[in-house]
Amino acid sequence: MQISRVMKQVACLFILPLLTVSPLAAKEKKGTESSAAYSLNFDEFRDKLAKKLNDLDRLNTVLHAYKRLTRQVQLPHESWKQLENWFIHKSLFMGSKCYNHALLFQEIPSLAKNIPFQQAYKGFVAEILSGYSLPTKEAATKTSKNITILFTGYYGGGHKAPAVAIAKHFQKNGHKVQLIDVDELENLYSPKVEGYSRAQVYAEVQQKKGDIEKARELWKRIDELQTHETRKYMGDIRKMVASFKADHIFAVAHHKPSLSYIGYQLGCPMTFVHTDHIFHTSLIPILEEQAKLQKPLINFTTLSNETSFLKTVYDSLKIPNCQLPQQIQRQLVRLDFPVRPSFCPVTKSERNEIRDELHIPRHALVCKIAMGLSGFTEEIKQLLMKIIREEKVLVRPLHVFVVCGKNMILQKQLEQLVKKNLRKKSKIHVEVLGFMEEKEMAKIDKASNVWVTKPGGSTSAELLQTQKQMLYILNANHPWEKTNAEYLKKQNLAQELSCTKPIVQQIRRRVWVDHRLDHSKILKSDWQNQALQILNGTTVNTKLKQANKK
């Protein structure tokens, strides 16, 4: 990266440790038309910064230092505006000892020529620097490490399940683990609108009801009600992780880039764990900013070596021919989807033992229907009715598990539907189930031939791990799930459910495919070893398949 002579001079001010605040060496010349005292809306700046940080203590520290900066120098109105915009956009990095604060002068070159501002800005940076010490070489070689795992628990099991899997694996290998549900902490400070907190809006309104417009309206109203004094949850997380003395942070929440703030404020190495087969667009600004740093603090996992995984990166950063710059490549590490230990392949004899235990005929077709929190209530009802009507085409018995999770209303409705429409001596047996723990769900999965479900990240990974077949239903509100489905289709493990074809016929088709599939060729997950390599800093950066470049 080329740096001008002026930039090199400016950068020198920030390479040395900022231990003292230097007094201003010079004053602005009076009477110049281009300079003006600070005159922007300070409250507006404060509120925008508060939304970004969600850490009241840090917010007050930054605002106090910024007020001092505005008194020390005079700048044109436009320069103040640019400066505040830069602070807001880089707020996750500001004050970190791992960040290059001199990057400001690349964004606003006019300030690089303003010596009084440079000196005042140096003092500003010194005042907001995080008080936490950077990791030592000894910490990197510790055999037993402290690992913090951040996840979002209100988004269904798609993030909690892999977070728990990672936690159990590290604990098994002698490490200490701190699990933090970010949603729980955020909800402590969230105002409620129509009975919903911020995180509940996603689970109850966007997921279960599928009403995106209503969800956006509620989020907007919650934002309007929440004052900057109550935006504290990220500060709570920072203090918890600091108290735990974490050596590494894993964020199983690729949709929440604000969590990078924790890593940079504490100077703690961090890894964002992807749980869908596409690089999340919200993480791209961090990826791009870290490309400017000598030592990026954060890694981003990839679920495969296919260039399609990084399509969003190529498109957003306008990278030609899928040729990743080294500054981007070094931030990517391979980590297959972490799956809980109960989900594993079984032999035919092991499957029969499970069926005996569950009182299912060994020769029966077994199907699991589960849609998570997606709000496919009517679709599930229609699906069940179609299966019941197709009984006459069945030769073998069909055993159907319908998993409703914590949706008690749906569970009751389906129980009534089955009782009303399924005859007593039917070849079809339907069990409507509520929430199940890991081992209970794993038994259902292992006993089943085919899953009828949506291709969420966790579900797709568990299917791949247990080597079952899927008939999937896509949710228009979850476009990222299509990438998971496409990945499974390449392994001959999935096909989209057709509403126009008989359901039983489609289930039989997937069983036929499974019988002819060479299971030894299905890609095996190595996430346990990959996770340990990431923790120990011995991982090899993701190498993309050259053959797929177009």
Image (cartoon, helix red, strand yellow):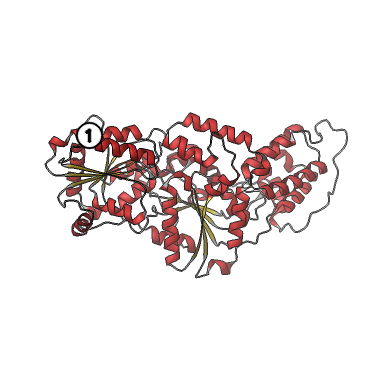
What amino acid does circle 1 point to? Asn
Q: Position of residue 240 (x, y in %)?
A: 59, 57
Instruction: Indicate whether 504 appears above or below 23.
Output: above
Q: Nearer the viewer, residue 262 or 428?
A: 428
User: On the rendered structure, is 127 left or right of 230?
Assistant: right
In the image, farthest residue toward the left: 395
Q: Nearer the viewer, residue 423 or 490?
A: 423
Rendering coords of residue 36 (x, y %)? 81, 34
In the figure, is residue 314 to the left or right of 430? right
Asked which secondary structure carries label 1, the reply is: helix
Q: Is residue 280 left or right of residue 372?
A: right
- 492 and 379: which is toward the camera: 379
* Residue at point 49%, 29% (across, down): 213
Residue corresponding to mark 1: 421
The x and y percentages for residue 262 are: 59, 52
x, y (%) of residue 211? Answer: 45, 31
